[in-house]
Amino acid sequence: MKKLLASTAAAALGLALVTATPASANLLTNGGFETAPMVDDGSGVGKWQPFGGTGVGLPTLSAIESVMPLSGANHLTLQIDNLANTFAGVFQDAAIIGGTSVTFSGWAKDLGVDAGGTEIRIEWRDSVANIEISRTGNFVPALTSAYTPWSLTDTAPAGADTARVVYAIQSFGAGPNQLIYVDDVSVIPEPASLALLGLGGLAMLRRR
């Protein structure tokens, strides 16, 4: 009876994962930055971790604000206030399995004097060994003063169990005055990868 219940539960989990809609498949927590403030405690598990060259307050700012959201009440603000050779950003860790293809996407607008300092990437990590296996190149989206969509797709390498998604700005190779608003961010497994995740869930339940 227990085996039958486990098999039924596993089948239901697999079906749910395979047929999940993009909205329900978002692997990120607080993708709309509605929960504030962020806490700078070094961990990006289940939440956004802010960072900056001078901390998370100006002249490098990484904060959740309500100035001009795309939707909801809040958005992410990243700012460099007239300071060269520094950075500001956030990251979050999402659980995945090797071979999973995901799309990291969202919306952003550029309200700063200087443009071109945005860096979007996925860092593939082994959380047990606490090491980075590989990462994508830094994607620099073409932003305007209106919210503009951006996306980055990549496949997790073997051995990776975490996708660390990063949205940052920097003034090493760009101007020292930058102001970026970010909202409605998601990490969505591609349809084939949803099936892979579903099979992974089945395997875990069967081992129990």
Image (tube, rainbow, N blue to C red):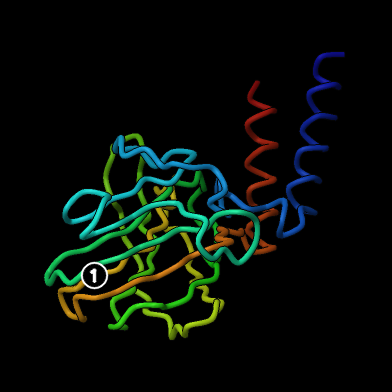
Q: For this view, does 177 lie left or right of residue 206?
A: left
What residue is drawn where x is 37% and y is 79%?
140
Q: Residue at x 41, y 49 (%)?
A: 160
Relative image position of residue 73 (x, y in whole percent): 61, 54
Tell me the residue that label 1 is attached to: 170
Quadrant (top left/top right/bottom left/bottom right) for the N terminus: top right
Left or right of 47? Residue 173 is left
- Could you tell whether 187 is left or right of 137 in the image? right
- Disc 1 residue type (three-letter): Gln
Q: Is residue 128 above or below residue 179?
A: above
Q: Taking the image as drawn, is residue 40 in sight?
A: yes
Q: The C terminus appears in which quarter of the rendering?
A: top right
Towards the viewer: 131 or 42: 42
**As displayed, is residue 121 above or below residue 55?**
below
Residue found farthest to the top: 1
Picture quadrant of residue 9: top right
The residue located at (57%, 63%) in the rendering is 69
